[in-house]
């Protein structure tokens, strides 16, 4: 490592899958981290971080942190492991790989990863290069925002919205299907600042939650009906002459087609779909049609549905109607990854794939993939993810993971539920121990992270693990025997992204954070990468692919066999299933709760606080009821990706969720999930 690790206060970056990608200020005493705060000099973090990361040292030095490789000696799913050396671990893994490749071909090996650590090298760097060269099956990493990103791109061309720093100028915020207070706290800070200057904040959600309490107004709608609400708003905006024709003529195509479609969605018709009273839709539309600048923060929740792609595509049309793009603080944002896109081809090296047409497995259908005898997965290699908890249809996933002839390797910091099904468990460094490069999918700053502490135990970073595996398999030294610094330089050598010009390894070392586009980001309207170069209210590409070329509401596809729609989103104190094993945060969350509407509870004879069983054809979960007005009739919500807890019968909520894919991008449909709730009879 190229930095002397010393006591004092040093800069770091938060590595978690959270839009805020905070700059951290970390204090070390006697080589140990004693304090973590937000970096006061970081333009977006501004000294504030969440409670999860303020106590990250408890995670780093947690007594249960994995410190050496282990081999499973008990049955799959048990906790019986024995310590082994890295040499033994590498020996077993490479021997298995070679045997599988000989007998079944390399595509019988499947990597499974997501963004437990968002560092570019450790999340999508050496790992990708390694599996490409190996010829392993490709993983379609679609568990998070795939449907919405695809839908947004049909309208806007790419994951590009406005610079969130500009939202201090916004006058009207629509926080749409986003639990901002829990999942993007710095956007809350920026919006609160705007509110001091008169901005109004409206939360549109299926669950009255922390974000509703913070917002000025709450619009409560039925799950999966947002496109109808947006079309109802468009109806009123166009009918009342509030559309900005000059903006539309200049920067959009397809207004007439959209207007024809929106004319069908009278507020009364939209009410019949969404459950939002027609008068409220009228009022919201007029507010949106007259406020400027207005900003829509589109969340991830509303796209975890069968119709998630079309929903986001539809909402993304709204700012063009009122000519918001180009006005400082006006527009929308689903994700901003496009601005700081790196040279992925150079670091991931897809050109190394022996067969570019090797099969691709959807990470949302891991259960089916593991249980498919026709094209068996013989080795699963998990890192940066905890599929036994986070992947849909958990019982299928676990049945797959339990297969006697599946060899599973998991690299993690803790013995997660996935590790319990693994043959070999490898200890991962925390990000504090690594050199890496961080981009954000919300703000526009790139940050270099230099290691601030010594490596713990025998832990290895993902980068080192895959590099060493490659070298043991005899892969080309010139491609694999490189340093982290070299790969960061490759990532930044981005010929397709002029916004990164001037952002070099040296410059980042000097500045710690640098903004894509510098201080002069071109206007969104000057960069729209759609086929027409304009905002596409009508999309020819969609028509060719068999979608409606104009926005439309499509009902959810989950069969109506069971009475309730269940949303199982993330909670305030964990990041997905990360932190769910930490006492401080468990205590804050207490236990998972199932929110049910009063009349529904009365009809079923349930009391607040009662333990119930939630079930469908995929599985069942025991949980405590919270009865109230936070959800509409027929809707249930529970938050948090808790690990299993056999001591109280708790199983992770993904026992209930479907593997079905969303309308676009192969996205997950966690929330288009029907269940019934029944009494729990004890004894
Ligand atoms: N504290 C915390 N922060 C996190 C995470 C975490 O686990 N915990 N996870 C991170 C990750 S990976 C992600 S992707 C983001 C996710 O963060 P968000 O983008 O906020 O997404 P969710 O919390 O999944 O869902 C947002 C809201 O959508 C609502 N919702 C569900 N269905 C519908 C619908 O049909 N219509 C509407 N309008 N609303 C609906 C839910 O009730 C929820 O309040 O947060 C990131 N930040
Ligand atoms: N029911 C339901 N399911 C969901 C969601 C939902 O809203 N509802 N949300 C979905 C979404 S949006 C997402 S993004 C996914 C997230 O799913 P995952 O990406 O699996 O996220 P985590 O549960 O945080 O698991 C990350 C794991 O990576 C490990 N890790 C951290 N750093 C490193 C490292 O440097 N190296 C290695 N090898 N491991 C590391 C952590 O310890 C942790 O166990 O979950 C999805 N699942
Ligand atoms: S989890 Fe999010 S809010 Fe918390 S410190 Fe990390 S980036 Fe910031
Ligand atoms: Mo996510």
Image (cartoon, rainbow, N blue to C red):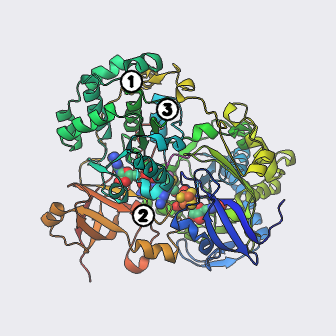
x, y (%) of residue 157?
Answer: 52, 29
Q: Which residue is the site of mark 2?
A: 640
In the picture, measured across the screen, residue 99 lies left or right of residue 108, that is right
- Relative to 389, 93 lies left or right: right
Instruction: Name the residue that disc number 1 marks.
Output: 549
Pointers 1 and 2 in contact (C-beta within 8 Å): no
- Residue 114 visible to an observer of this rendering: no
CA–CA distance in space, label 2 to label 3? 29 Å
The answer to whether mark 2 is within 8 Å of ligand 1 is yes
Residue 622: x percent and y percent?
A: 33, 71
Q: Residue furthest bottom?
A: 683
Q: CA distance from mark 1 to mark 2?
A: 36 Å
The quadrant of the picture occupied by the C terminus is bottom left
Which corner quadrant of the image does residue 18 belong to? bottom right
Q: Please provide the residue range marked out in magenta.
A: 140-144
Question: Pointer 3: what residue?
Answer: 153
Residue 559 sits above or below residue 316 on the image: below
Q: Position of residue 60 (x, y in %)?
A: 64, 72
Q: Is residue 247 magenta?
A: no
**Whether residue 652 can be seen here:** yes
| Residue 429 sits in quarter | bottom right
Q: What residue is shown at x 31% (from left), y 35% (from top)?
A: 230
Closer to the camera, 620 or 290? 290
Query: Which of the two residues, 216 or 81, is positioned nearer the viewer here?
Result: 216
Of marks 1 and 2, which one's residue comes earlier in the chain?
A: 1
Under circle 1, the secondary element is loop
Q: Main secondary structure of the magenta part?
A: loop
Q: Secondary structure at mark 2?
A: loop
Vertical relation: 11 (above or below) 200: below
Binning the other alpha carbons within 10 Å of mark 3 as few (below 14), some (14 to 19) or many (20 upward) gives: many
């Amino acid at each position: 490592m190229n930095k002397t690790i010393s006591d004092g206060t040093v800069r770091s970056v938060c590595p978690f899958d959270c839009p805020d990608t905070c700059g951290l200020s970390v204090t070390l005493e006697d080589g140990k981290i004693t304090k973590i705060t937000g970096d006061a000099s970081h333009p977006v973090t501004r000294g504030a971080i969440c409670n999860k990361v303020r106590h990250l040292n408890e995670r780093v030095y947690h007594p249960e942190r994995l410190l050496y490789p282990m081999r499973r000696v008990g049955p799959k799913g048990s906790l019986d492991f024995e310590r082994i050396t890295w040499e033994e671990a590498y020996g077993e893994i490479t021997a298995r790989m070679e045997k599988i490749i000989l007998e079944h071909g390399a595509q019988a090996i499947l990597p499974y990863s997501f963004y437990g650590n968002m560092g570019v090298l450790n999340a999508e760097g050496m790992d990708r290069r390694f599996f490409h060269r190996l010829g392993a099956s490709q993983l379609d990493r679609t568990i998070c925002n795939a449907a919405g990103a695809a839908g947004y791109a049909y309208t806007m061309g790419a994951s590009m919205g406005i610079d969130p720093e500009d939202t201090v100028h916004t006058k009207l915020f629509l926080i749409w299907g986003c639990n901002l207070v829990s999942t993007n706290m710095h956007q809350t800070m920026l919006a609160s600042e705007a509110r001091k200057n008169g901005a109004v904040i409206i939360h549109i959600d299926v669950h009255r939650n922390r974000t509703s309490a913070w917002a000025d107004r709450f619009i409560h709608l039925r799950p999966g009906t947002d496109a109808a609400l947006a079309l109802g708003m468009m109806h009123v905006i166009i009918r009342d002459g509030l559309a900005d024709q000059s903006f539309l003529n200049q920067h959009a195509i397809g207004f007439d087609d959209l207007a024809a479609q929106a004319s069908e969605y009278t507020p009364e018709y939209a009410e019949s779909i969404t459950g939002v009273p027609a008068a409220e839709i009228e009022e919201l539309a007029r507010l949106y049609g007259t406020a400027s600048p207005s900003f829509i923060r589109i969340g991830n929740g509303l796209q975890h549905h069968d119709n998630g792609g079309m929903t986001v595509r539809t909402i993304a049309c709204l700012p063009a109607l009122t000519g918001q793009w180009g006005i400082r603080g006006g527009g929308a944002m689903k994700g901003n990854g496009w601005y700081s896109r790196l040279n992925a081809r150079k670091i991931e090296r897809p050109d190394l794939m022996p067969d570019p047409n090797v099969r691709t497995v959807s990470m949302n259908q891991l259960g089916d993939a593991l249980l498919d005898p026709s094209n068996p997965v013989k080795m699963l290699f998990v890192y940066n993810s905890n599929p036994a908890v986070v992947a849909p249809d958990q019982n299928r996933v676990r049945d797959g993971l339990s297969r006697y002839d599946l060899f599973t390797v998991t690299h993690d910091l803790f013995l997660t539920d996935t590790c319990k099904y693994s043959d070999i468990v490898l200890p991962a460094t925390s990000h504090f121990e690594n050199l890496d490069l961080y981009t954000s999918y919300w703000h526009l700053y790139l940050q270099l992270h230099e290691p601030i502490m010594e490596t713990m135990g025998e832990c290895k970073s993902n980068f080192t693990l895959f590099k060493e595996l490659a070298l043991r398999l005899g892969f080309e030294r010139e491609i694999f025997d490189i340093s982290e610094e070299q790969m960061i330089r490759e990532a930044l050598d981005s010929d397709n992204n002029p916004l990164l010009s001037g952002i070099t390894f040296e410059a980042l070392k000097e500045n710690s954070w640098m903004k894509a586009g510098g201080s002069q980001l071109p206007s969104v309207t000057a960069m729209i990468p759609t086929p027409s170069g304009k905002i596409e209210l009508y999309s020819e590409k969609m028509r060719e692919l068999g979608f409606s070329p104009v926005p439309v509401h499509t009902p959810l596809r989950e069969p109506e066999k069971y009475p309730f729609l269940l949303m199982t989103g993330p909670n305030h104190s964990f990041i997905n299933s990360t932190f769910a094993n930490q006492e401080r945060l468990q205590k804050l969350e207490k236990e998972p709760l199932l929110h049910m509407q009063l009349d529904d509870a009365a009809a079923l004879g349930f009391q607040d606080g009662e333990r119930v069983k939630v079930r469908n054809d995929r599985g069942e979960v025991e949980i405590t009821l919270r009865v109230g007005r936070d959800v509409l009739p027929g809707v249930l919500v529970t938050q948090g990706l808790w690990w299993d807890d056999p001591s109280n019968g708790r199983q992770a909520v993904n026992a209930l969720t479907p593997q079905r894919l969303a309308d676009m991008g192969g996205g997950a449909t966690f929330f288009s999930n029907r269940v019934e709730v029944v009494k729990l009879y004890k004894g």
